[in-house]
Amino acid sequence: MTENKAMNKTDRNSRSAETRNSQTRRTPWAPPSMLDAPEPPPGYQFRWIREATRGQDDKSNMSKRIREGYEPVRAEDFPEFEAPTIDSGSNSGVIGVGGLILAKVPIETANERTAYFHGQAKSAMDGVDHNFMRESDGRMPIKDSDIQRTSKVAFGSKNTTGKGN
């Protein structure tokens, strides 16, 4: 009798668990990225920064980035993520590839840095505009509407004669 119960026992897997595999879409193949990174911790963002160029350490760039608030990301902080690490030197154990190392920075610091450089660019453009407007002459004045900030590139030639080839 107990043998019959064991043989008549039904599979207790839910139907949604059985169909989930068939509903998952296959992602198309794409070449792997050399600069994959794990998900950053809350409140931080990751950025790849230059540690070396052609095998020569770039200590000035690293020093500048550290002073800006960047911290190198150690592979041991992300054990679930397989990443290439630097084997020797002062950045031993840090996630890095091809002269670049992964660094984290607080989002607020990154936003402040971005705002600073946007301000620098705006100041430079205002200077260019002011210098350009100094060239204005009363006989042929330059108006703000005359300044174009966009350009258009066209390839090939257009038939301007109105005739065929």
Image: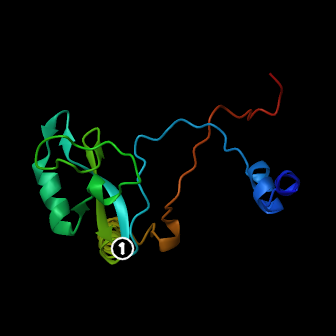
Q: On the picture, is 100 further left or further right than 26?
A: left
Q: Position of residue 71 (x, y in %)?
A: 23, 63
Which quarter of the image is occupied by the C terminus?
top right
Query: Who's the residue at 53% across and 52% down the image?
Result: 151
Q: Position of residue 52 (x, y in %)?
A: 19, 42
Q: Position of residue 53 (x, y in %)?
A: 20, 38
Q: Relative to 126, does residue 32 appear above or below in the rendering? A: above
Which of the 4 image quarters holds residue 6? bottom right
Which of the 4 image quarters holds residue 125? bottom left
33 or 147: nearer the viewer? 33
Callout 1 crowding tier (Cα within 10 Å): few <14, some 14–19, many ≥20? some
Q: Relative to 68, does residue 38 appear above or below in the rendering? A: above
Q: Position of residue 131 (x, y in %)?
A: 30, 67
Q: On the picture, is 13 further left or further right than 27?
A: right
Q: Is residue 134 visible?
A: no
Q: On the picture, is 56 further left or further right than 94?
A: left
Q: Which residue is mark 1?
A: 107
68 or 12: nearer the viewer? 12
| SS type, badge 1 | helix
Which of the 4 image quarters holds residue 45? bottom left
Q: How is the image coloured?
A: rainbow
Q: On the picture, is 150 further left or further right than 87?
A: right
Query: Who's the residue at 52% across and 58% down the image?
Result: 150
